[in-house]
Image (cartoon, helix red, strand yellow):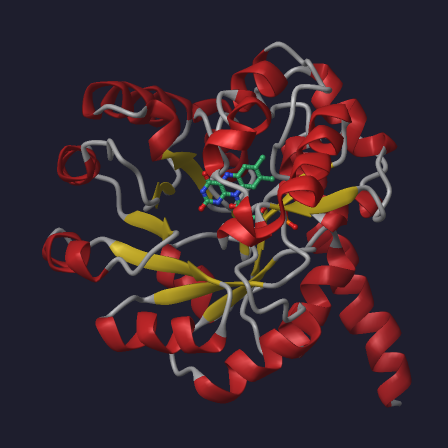
Amino acid sequence: MKTRITELFGIEHPIIQGGMHYVGFAEMASAVSNAGGLGIITGLTQGTPEKLAAEIARCQQMTDKPFGVNMTFLPSVTPPDYPGLMQTIIDSGIKVVETAGNNPAEWLPMLKEADIKVIHKCTSVRHSLKAQQIGCDAVSVDGFECGGHPGEDDVTNYILLPRAADELDIPFVASGGQADARSLVASLALGAEGMNMGTRFIATKEAPVHGNVKQALVAASELDTRLVMRSLRNTERVLMNPGVERLIEKEKALGDALKFEDIVEEVAGIYPKIMVDGEMDAGAWSCGMVAGLIYDIPSVDELISRIMSEADAIINDRLRGFAA
Ligand SMILES: Cc1cc2nc3c(=O)[nH]c(=O)nc-3n(C[C@H](O)[C@H](O)[C@H](O)COP(=O)(O)O)c2cc1C
């Protein structure tokens, strides 16, 4: 399948693995790239330029296909060394960066100078247009279904994707709620030129996370995610568990008076507990509604091959049949 996204990134299939904290290690990114998609290492999980350089080098040992690095810009009292991390990306010869969390304008000149393609993840049409205006090469349009931070507009992909198609000139991928061939073909029909998956890639053999996480995704239904931290305007879609229940109780009790300090126990330092130790009750970790569409734990190559062959069948048999 050839789209503006496969052409832009030099990949075989229009499938991207979005940056994921404590998941987007070299094992995950290289597996996706080796299967013909675009794998992405999560820069902030590494945290320092030295560690990120080592992780990129490890991934380069594991694949000779293109892969990218995610840079998430979060408000923080002690921000990570963003200039150092960006310089590391450039010095390592990376050719794709996925930005998220905030306007990446400040970083575009140095990335463009290094001939790096930038795909910015946005949750609204206005932010997508901004990304286009500042010179991003593509956007990842992240609907309300998505795991992680859906923004505050609550527009689902059935509206958001065609709206993006109506406004944007640069290519975009559909992100949020994407799981299988049906997602891919529907996204293409709505105007996207590929899809970005987060949650679905965690339930694969190669995802370097505790087996409990993969089992939890297979067990979860589409009813099992919750939105937290809305009153802090930092809404996150997470998988329900006792830690999240506690968080929601605090949100109910404190209302708009809630401060980040009140929920530190349920939201800070949770990722290693979940992803490394498999303590599934620990607290808030990002998970999409798409968990309801996850029934198995295939290898990444099986997953991507299945998506591409079933997409072909949907387009050439099912849809063509309707057209006739
Ligand atoms: C466990 C997890 C961690 C994530 N961490 C990040 C992150 O650090 N930076 C980022 O830009 N997006 C992050 N995301 C969002 C994904 O890149 C992707 O946009 C999202 O998962 C798409 O929705 P889906 O889960 O429905 O596929 C994360 C998602 C998950 C599930």
Of residues 183 and 130, the one nearer the viewer is 130
Of residues 85 and 115, the one nearer the viewer is 85
Residue 104 drawn above or below residue 79: below
x then y, percent, for residue 282: 66, 19
The quadrant of the image that shows the N terminus is: bottom right
Q: In this view, does 231 lie to the left or right of 25?
A: right
The quadrant of the image that shows the C terminus is: bottom right
Question: How many dots with numbers?
Answer: 0
Residue 121 appearing in the image? yes
Q: Is residue 76 left or right of residue 105?
A: right
Residue 209 appearing in the image? no
Q: Residue extending furthest top?
A: 277
**Which quadrant of the frame does ligand 1 lie within?**
top right
x then y, percent, for residue 312: 74, 63
Quarter holding residue 270: top right
Quarter holding residue 163: bottom right
Residue 225 drawn above or below residue 123: above
Quarter holding residue 52: top left
Of residues 208 and 158, the one nearer the viewer is 158
Q: Is residue 117 left or right of residue 177?
A: left
Of residues 214 and 39, the one nearer the viewer is 214
x then y, percent, for residue 123: 51, 64
Instruction: Please name the residue shown 56% across and 22% down the image.
Output: 265
Instruction: Please name the residue shown 59% across and 19% down the image.
Output: 275
Instruction: Please name the residue shown 77% across and 71% down the image.
Output: 315
x then y, percent, for residue 231: 56, 52
